[in-house]
Amino acid sequence: MSMIRSPEKAPEGLKKIDWAGRHMPVLSGLADRYAPARPFAGLKIAICIHLEAKTAYMASVFQRCGAAVTITGSNPLSTQDDVAAALVKKGITVFAWHNATAEEYNSHIRHTVESGPDLLIDDGADLITMMHRERPDLLPRVRGGAEETTTGLNRLRAMAGAKKLAFPVIAVNDAFCKYLFDNRHGTGQSVWDGIMRTTNLLVAGKTVVVAGFGWCGRGVALRARGLGARVIVTEVDPVRALEAAVEGYQVMPMRRAAPLGDIFITTTGCSAVISKDELRCLKDGAILSNAGHFDVEIDKGALNSLTERVGEPRANIEEYRFPDGRRVYLLAEGRLVNLAAGDGHPAEIMDLSFALQFLAMDYLRKHEALPREVLPLPEELDRKVAGLKLAAMGIAIDELTESQRDYLGSA
């Protein structure tokens, strides 16, 4: 039995899912191709991803292809109650609601684990790690999983390195059609969508500090510059710092950037990226936001110890006041600002990521003797998704001739 709130909102959620599906031609095409054979019939799929319209459409595709689907949210603030209600209306089991407490959030994941899945899709590895810790009796049934995030892969690779991973996990996050588009263009656009709709403030002319210059940071910085901001990048990796510098961004330590920034966005996946020392130096009116998976990149404990929380001037904005009168603003409780304060990545971007997830599940379904490791998505599946997306966009490309193949393959 599902655990949701606001079942009366299902009609609104169904409209959202339909809208997303209309803009996800690759996943829709895969559904049309695979559904008649119902390849996932008899299999249970458990999903733990941000529970909004694009994710819901993917869950619906798996259901259409025969799977029994159980789904929960990977972040308490990103679950949309109308979408959750719509999935229940469709016959999918849902354990999630918006603004769940930590206890409720863990309970929802626990119920999802207890569905006894054959295949898992995770975003941050909370689902997979809980199954290993709390229900090892269910592990032998699992054929494999797929992970959507860098943060989750870091956790899973640590488990694999310690020989504790009980089944293969495909690193969908590392596929070209995921990180080149989802992490860069999806995060780049959706982060600013979340910040701008929450604050209703101008970006042009402000100083934006982007912590981390991985693919997510690249996208956030690129769009900040496009919106007219002065952009500072902070990094710990010298190669990425050099990349940012030669692309024209200012690069400096966070301690030097702290008193300069008007808007801060953390994109690192690490903890205390903006720590107590940096928080002390913030200018009056500074805005803090996070685009990493967990709400640990901005040290909220230190922020509370240095300031007094004085209110919520707008929805999803917490105002903190220093003893000297300076005020700083934390967006979406320091959680993923693009999902906790927005609708997440554009549908066309998630079309790529979720098509990869679909093909990863199909691959695991067909291959039952894979090593218990974090595995790359097969390159041919990555290229297949790229080709399908190009076709959906009406774009044709050249093909190598036989003589060209011979030339490239010659010694």
Image (cartoon, rainbow, N blue to C red):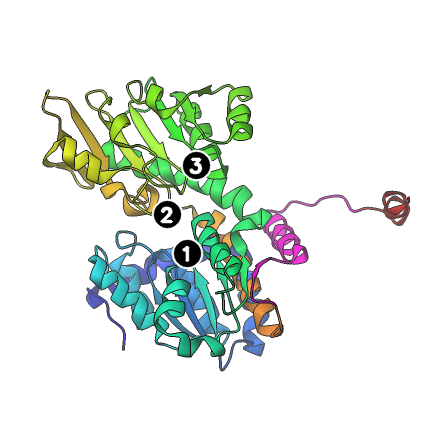
Q: Which residue is mark 2?
A: 293
Residue 250 is inside the magenta segment: no
Q: Secondary structure at mark 3?
A: helix
- Mark 1 or mark 3, which is nearer the start of the sequence? 1
Residue 353 visible, this angle: yes
Q: Quadrant of the N terminus?
A: bottom left
Residue 63 image-quadrant placement? bottom left
Query: Residue placed at 32% from the left, 29% from the top?
Result: 264
Which one is closest to the eye, mark 3 or mark 1?
1
- Mark 2 or mark 1, which is nearer the start of the sequence? 1
Residue furthest bottom in the image: 42
Please state which of residues 157 and 261 is positioned toward the viewer in this rendering: 157
Q: Three-letter amino acid code at disc 2?
A: His
Q: Which residue is mark 3?
A: 188
In the rendered view, does 250 fall on the left or right side of 376?
left
Q: Position of residue 31 (x, y in %)?
A: 53, 66
Query: Residue placed at 36% from the left, 57% from the top?
Result: 53
Q: Are marks 1 and 2 in contact (CB under 8 Å)?
A: yes
Q: Which residue is mark 1?
A: 123
Residue furthest front in the image: 162
Q: How many marks?
A: 3
Please state which of residues 277 and 395 is positioned toward the viewer in this rendering: 277
Which class describes the residues within 10 Å of circle 2: few (<14), some (14-19), or many (20+)?
A: many
Which class describes the residues within 10 Å of circle 3: few (<14), some (14-19), or many (20+)?
A: many
Q: Three-letter amino acid code at disc 3?
A: Gly
Q: Position of residue 361 (x, y in %)?
A: 54, 67
In the rendered view, does 410 fall on the left or right side of 209?
right
Q: Position of residue 106 (x, y in %)?
A: 27, 63
The disc at residue 243 is: none
